[in-house]
Image (cartoon, grey):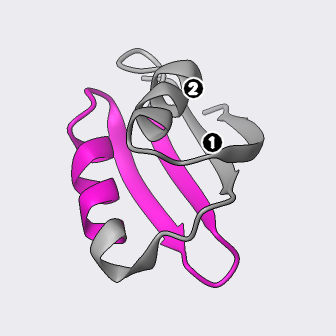
């Protein structure tokens, strides 16, 4: 299993209600391991198994949920 983390900066704030929905929707993607949301600076971090999902699929899901992504950063984890 190959792991990676992708970090998204978004324009629109997430908020408490949105955080729960966001985590639920992203957790439903096969391969997503964890989702962290920082309401303070509107960042979303997703750890995932690259054999189950990729960065573009996660980004597409965020866009479907209405998030305007301003910046993306990917980190591959080598074990």
Q: Position of residue 53 (x, y in %)?
A: 41, 21
* Residue plotted at (43% across, 78% down): 15
Mark earlier in primary sequence (1, 2): 1
Where's the N terminus, which quadrant?
A: top left
Q: Is residue 12 rendered to the left or right of residue 25? A: right
* Residue 16 placement: quadrant: bottom left
**SS of the residue under disc 2:** helix
- Is 27 magenta? The answer is yes
Q: Is residue 59 rendered to the left or right of residue 15? A: right
Q: Position of residue 51 (x, y in %)?
A: 41, 15
Front residue of 55 and 64:
64
* Residue plotted at (60% across, 43% down): 5
State how far apart marks 1 and 2 are (Cα): 7 Å
| Crowdedness near tag 1: few (<14), some (14–19) or many (≥20) residues, C-alpha within 10 Å | some
**SS of the residue under disc 1:** strand
* Residue plotted at (63% across, 42% down): 6
- Determine whether label 1 and label 2 are within 8 Å by CB: yes
- Is 1 magenta? The answer is no
| Residue 6 tag number | 1
Residue 45's place in the image compared with 41, above or below, is above
Q: Is residue 5 rendered to the left or right of residue 76? A: left
Where's the C terminus, which quadrant?
A: top right
Residue 23's place in the image compared with 66, above or below, is below
* Residue plotted at (48% across, 69% down): 14
Q: Which residue is farthest top? A: 51
| Residue 55 tag number | 2
**Count of number-bearing discs:** 2
Q: Position of residue 63 (x, y in %)?
A: 50, 35
First to last magenta residue range = 19-48
| Residue 22 tag number | none
| Crowdedness near tag 2: few (<14), some (14–19) or many (≥20) residues, C-alpha within 10 Å | some
Q: Position of residue 18 (x, y in %)?
A: 34, 67
């Amino acid at each position: 299993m190959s792991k990676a983390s992708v970090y998204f900066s978004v324009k629109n704030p997430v908020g408490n209600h949105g955080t729960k929905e966001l985590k639920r929707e992203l957790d439903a993607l096969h391969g997503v391991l964890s989702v962290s949301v920082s309401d303070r600076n509107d960042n979303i971090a997703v750890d995932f198994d690259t054999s189950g999902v990729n960065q573009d699929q996660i980004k597409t899901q965020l866009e479907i949920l209405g998030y305007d992504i301003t910046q993306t950063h990917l980190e591959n984890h080598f074990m």
